[in-house]
Image: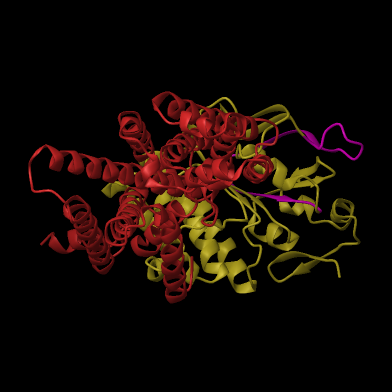
Chain colours: A red, B yellow
Amino acid sequence: MFKTAEHQSLRRHSKPITSSKHMRNYVLVMAVLVTLAVGFTVAVMSYNIPVACCDERWWLIAGMRRDSLLTIAVVALAHAVATVAFQTAVNNRILTPGIMGFGSLYTVIQTAAAYLFGVGGVVALVGVGPFLLQLLAMMVLATILYTWLLSGRFSNIHIMLLVGVVIGGVLGSLSNFMQRMLDPSTFDVLTARLFGNISNARAEYLPYAVPIVLLVTALLWWRANTLNVMALGKTAALNLGVSYKRELIIIMALVSVLVATATALVGPMMFLGFLSAILAYQFADTYSHRLLLPMAFLFGYTILAGSYFILRHVWDAGGAVTVIVELIGGLVFLIVLMRKGRL
Amino acid sequence: MSISLSEVQKDYSAGSRDSVQIGPVTTEIEAGGITALVGPNGAGKSTILTMIGRLLEIDHGQITVAGHDVVSTPSKAIAKILSVLRQENHFVTRLTVRQLVGFGRFPHSGGRLTLGDEKYISEAIDFLDLTDLENRYLDQLSGGQRQRAYVAMVLAQQTDYVLLDEPLNNLDMQHAVQMMQQLRRAADELGRTIVIVLHDINFAAHYSDRILAMKNGQVVKHGRPAEIMQDKVLSDIFNTEVQVIEGPNGPLAVYY
């Protein structure tokens, strides 16, 4: 019957999942990640609430924890999606958007406020207005950088990255210089702010950050097929009819919105995006961004929510979340890399 | 229907003292068969090829492929009539041969592969003898096999014009000959117009229908292999004493 022919054509396919074994692996990893993510969410929401259920105080605490989880989800989504898209666009899996100096700009804004206005300056940078201003400053920097460097006569990713690194370095030393002249108590307040910290985020930022991140993620999701092609490199993408320069600028602009939002929300996090992306590449083992992005997000969320739960609620050391993310994350990354033997 | 270049020019490091200029080149590459671009290093072969393939900006002049201006026609439309492959193709994604070839359908499918696309992909893979390797990952292949996979990708693109920049680089004798035979078949059986940059004049003479010889950014000779394969012509093009002798399968250039 026609069944054999159909079987034949089904067997020879070019889909992003190569075999049933590959499919099984992907589904399994996703299932484990979803379980972990839900588990940590429930754990954070329910662990050790000091008051009995359902009165006013309980709702207050539950609401605060919900906001923390929402912040974690937004940050994980922004970093994971931004890093995967960035690494695809620059065709390099070692660089992260952090290399473009977002963290340094955030640091310099915070430090300048502390330097010029003392502790009051740092405190004044809290609130919706300053949040949006910082967001805007970072987006403007990135957009100028990308459009200038990618559309001008340089038109070269490596020059763009180099300029990003140099700008990051300049801003870094500027912050360093100002920090040296702070008095110890101001410096202390500032330092707390400069570590990426979930508690930096205020609930009132979320109504702005959530839609921004969701919208930009949707835009990148919509471009997933173009991203797949851009991962083949510039000439292959041009050959296949992608307007490379235009797409590159669009992707870079979207990435910078994501990273700027996450940074303005909780402060710089160097490693989270890198880790989520690299783990997603390892475990999804596919080129398709529609499969990579959800997994990268789940890795990011699981790692961040997991370390937040353990540190904040079990060990009562909420400020150290990023430190642990980098420590554990780095180890996991090395182990995975050693076992697989390739990036 | 042909590729036509009029007053095409590219200036490298314009303004500086040691600026290099390719062109102006005015010529016409007929449709059908294989046209080989030959010439010494720095003659502008790859420059011309990549400008036709709209990978490199044209500083002056105009290039049309089958009547379409390569600069003003949307890239997406060009991708359906012309494909171009450069020599350096390294990327970070992990792809199987078949997935790579599948990307050749992108201009037509926009990333959503239909059964018809899969048929073209299978054909391209079979055509280049990659059937047994189609589910291998690219990093598990030898250089020659990988090169064939890239060529399969541009064949799956189903374009009338195929531009290849030194596809024989890094291939040993066996694989170089195989590659040229497969390209010959693509031209003869599939009716593709193939423009190819070659370093080995003997390969060019044996497998191509026309040879376009370049030197110092100019086209110096354009004709059938028999017109090019002459002592004086080749010696002039390559700045080397070249002697053409009659080999068992046609003329051979001897230069060492």
- For the stretch drawn in magenta, the main secondary structure is strand
Residue drawn at 33 percent across, 50 percent down: A297
Task: Say whether residue B144 is left or right of residue A329.
Answer: right
Which residue is at the front of the view, A141 or A5?
A141
What x and y, as percent, mark residue A107? 56, 40
Task: Say whether residue A339 is left or right of residue B114.
Answer: right
Tell me which segment is drawn in magenta.
Answer: B11-40
Which residue is at the front of the view, A272 or A341?
A272
Q: Is residue B84 above or below residue A7?
A: above
Q: Is residue B33 magenta?
A: yes
What x and y, as percent, mark residue B145? 51, 68
Task: Say whether residue A172 is left or right of residue A211.
Answer: right
Q: Could one spot residue A15 in this view of the protein? A: no
- Total marks shown come to 0
What x and y, as percent, mark residue B48? 70, 41
Q: Is residue A218 magenta?
A: no
Which residue is at the front of the view, B96 or B192?
B96
Task: Say whether residue A213 is left or right of residue B246.
Answer: left
Location of residue A238 by image quarter: top right
Residue drawn at 49 percent across, 68 percent down: B139
Residue drawn at 46 percent across, 43 percent down: A267
The C terminus of chain B appears in which quarter of the rendering?
A: bottom right
The N terminus of chain B appears in which quarter of the rendering?
A: top right
What x and y, as percent, mark residue A341? 47, 74
